[in-house]
């Protein structure tokens, strides 16, 4: 949980810190992702200066099956 909070602080100061996530290239929003603690990935987008966390998942699993979580 501490790593998640650290990532959130970084995102608040630098919303574009996460790389644009190619898994969501076909979506109308620009989704970014940041690795948290080495094993988890936080997917987010920024809209009107608000950061929305769209998904949080385990990087050890197949990503394609998890993209359906993000709407």
Image (cartoon, rainbow, N blue to C red):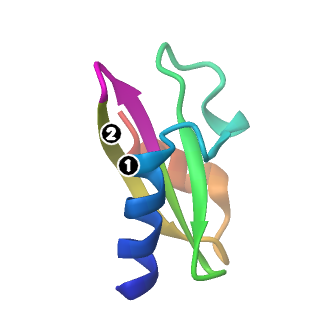
Residue 36 falls in image quadrant: bottom right
The magenta span reads 44-49
Label 2 to label 1, Cα distance in Å?
8 Å
Identify the residue at horizontal 53%, vertical 20% (top origin).
Answer: 27
Q: Is residue 57 magenta?
A: no
- Give the position of the C terminus as an image quadrant: top left
Q: Where residue 25 appears, x then y in whole percent? A: 66, 24
Identify the residue at horizontal 33%, vertical 22% (top origin).
Answer: 47
Given contact means CB atoms under 8 Å apart, are the residues at marks 2 and 1 in contact? yes
Residue 4 as seen in the image, left or right of residue 60: left
| Residue under pointer 2 | 51
Residue 8 as seen in the image, left or right of residue 41: left
- Give the position of the N terminus as an image quadrant: bottom left
Residue 45 as seen in the image, left or right of residue 62: left
| Residue under pointer 1 | 12
Q: Which mark is residue 33?
A: none
Identify the residue at horizontal 49%, vertical 13% (top origin).
Answer: 28
Identify the residue at horizontal 46%, vertical 81% (top origin).
Answer: 3
């Amino acid at each position: 949980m501490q790593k998640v909070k650290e990532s959130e602080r970084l995102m608040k100061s630098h919303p574009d810190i996460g790389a644009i996530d190619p898994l969501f290239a076909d979506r109308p929003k620009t989704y970014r992702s940041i690795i948290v603690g080495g094993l988890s990935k936080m997917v987010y987008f920024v809209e009107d200066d608000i950061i929305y966390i769209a998904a949080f998942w385990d990087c050890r699993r197949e990503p394609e099956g998890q993209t359906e979580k993000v709407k």
